[in-house]
Amino acid sequence: MEMAGKKQVVLVAVDESNESMHALEWAVEHLFSSASVAANFKIILIHVKPPPVSILRISGPGMGDVLSIVDNDLKKTAALVTDKAKEICEKRSVTDFEVVATEGDARNVLCEAVEKHHADMLIMGSHGYGTFKRAILGSVSDYCAHHAPCSVLIVKKPKANANH
């Protein structure tokens, strides 16, 4: 699978959740534990911003102003998320990373990004939704685990009472 000198491309999905930042920290800690190991990997941090219309789910006259406000808020969130993700990488002296911010349904966008960037692995956090909430919202990580054309690592955040 790996050619000599070719870096493994790891796509890490980041959003505003603690779970996704935990997944990024896990990836950086385990993939970049030493300079010699780090030399084998390139990280692509990807943030998928939902379209403003998907947040509102309503339309009609005068909605343009509301959509604009929602879109600006989503853009601010995306900037905060990507800045925090960059900070996590820089703190660990990870230099071979790039940030991609895009818009759409995270399930499809992440699977398409894996193909586009020829990723060897997709790493993402698990929000830990219960059965009911997952049935209503759908699980992005579950979808990607079944549809992404690469290995998918779903990093779960340790429970607060776990003894480690």
Image (cartoon, rainbow, N blue to C red):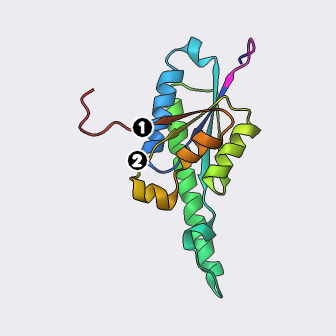
Please say if 5 is above or below 111: above
Q: Which quadrant holds residue 55?
A: bottom right
**What number is the disc on residue 156?**
1
Query: What amino acid type should be assigned to the residue bearing mark 1?
Result: Lys
Query: What amino acid type should be assigned to the residue bearing mark 2?
Result: Gly
Neighbor class of circle 2 (other Cα within 10 Å; few <14, some 14-19, many 20+) is few
Circles 1 and 2: CB atoms closer than 8 Å: yes
- Kindly tell me whether residue 101 is visible in this rendering: no
Q: Residue at x 30, y 39 (%)?
A: 159
Q: Residue at x 53, y 21 (%)?
A: 32
Q: Position of residue 3 (x, y in %)?
A: 75, 15
Neighbor class of circle 1 (other Cα within 10 Å; few <14, some 14-19, many 20+) is some
**What number is the disc on residue 128?**
2
Camera-nearest residue between 146 and 39? 146
Mark 1 and mark 2: Cα distance apart in space: 8 Å
Please say if 66 is above or below 149: below
Q: Secondary structure at mark 1?
A: loop
Q: Position of residue 7 (x, y in %)?
A: 69, 21
**What number is the disc on residue 137?**
none
- Kindly tell me whether residue 149 is visible in this rendering: yes
Q: Earlier in the sequence, mark 1 or mark 2?
A: 2
In this rendering, position of residue 61 left or right of residue 161: right
Magenta stretch, residue numbers = 3-8
Quarter of the image with the N terminus is top right
| Majority SS type along the magenta span | loop
Task: Check if residue 149 falls in the magenta segment.
Answer: no
